[in-house]
Amino acid sequence: MQNIDQTKINSEYSFEIEKANRYISEKQFSKAMHHLERAHILGQRSLYRHGFVHYQMLLVAFKTVDVKEIVGQITRLFAVPLGWVSGWVPKGNTGRANVSAIKPMPLPEDMRPYLDGFSVFRDVLARALVFSLLLLAYIIL
C-alpha cells in the first residue's frame, strides 16, 4: 500500500479548482463541472474542500438552471459533514447528481498515484475508534 502525499493532493486539488473557475468565468460550464468532479475526487476527505466543491457545483447548477443538479448538490452539501465525521467518502466518486452519492467509482488513471493508498474502511474504522474512546472518556469522567 502506498503512502498518501497530501501535499501533492492539495496541489492537484487547487489546480482543478483554478481550471474550473476559469471555465466558469468563460461560461464553459460543462468543462467547469469536469474539473469540479476531479477536484471532488481529490478533496472529499477534507471537510472544507469537499463542501467547497459541492458549493461550486451548486453555483454552476444554478447558472445552467439544472434542477436535478441543484437538488442533488443541496442534498450533498448537507451530507458533507456526516461523511466527514463518519469517514465514509466513496473513493473515486465524482460528486455529481447523476451518480449515487454513496457509490465508489474507479479512480481516473492520473489520480491513482495520489489516492491508491486511501482506504475508506480504514478511515471509518479510525473514526469509530476515536469516537468510541471519546464516548468512553465522557462516561468515565
Image (cartoon, rainbow, N blue to C red):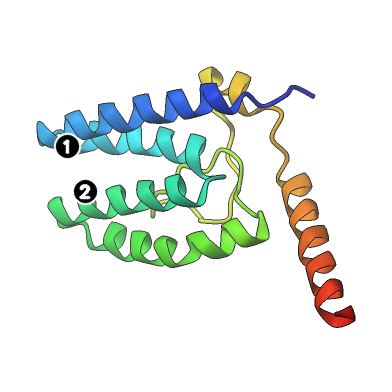
Please tell me whether mark 1 sits on a helix, a strand or a loop. Answer: helix
- Residue 108, relative to residue 61: is it above or below? above
> Quarter-wise, where is residue 112 in the image?
top right
Q: What residue type is disc 2 on?
A: Val
Counting residues from the start of the chain, the first of labels 1 and 2 encountered is 1
Rounded to the nearest angstrom, the CA distance separating label 1 from label 2 is: 7 Å
Residue at 45%, 48% (x, y): give it. 50
Instruction: Give the quarter of the figure containing the N terminus.
Output: top right
Q: Is residue 29 left or right of residue 88?
A: left
Give the residue pinned by disc 1: 24
> Quarter-wise, where is residue 135 in the image?
bottom right
- Residue 119, relative to residue 117: is it above or below? below
Residue found farthest to the right: 140
Q: Is residue 48 left or right of residue 115?
A: left
Residue at 43%, 61% (x, y): give it. 76
Q: Does the image show residue 106?
A: yes
Q: Is residue 39 left or right of residue 141?
A: left
Residue at 73%, 48% (x, y): give it. 123
Give the residue pinned by disc 2: 60
- Residue neighbourhood size for the residue with mark 2, other residues' Cα within 10 Å, grouped as few (<14), some (14–19), many (≥20): many
Marks 1,2: beta carbons within 8 A:
yes
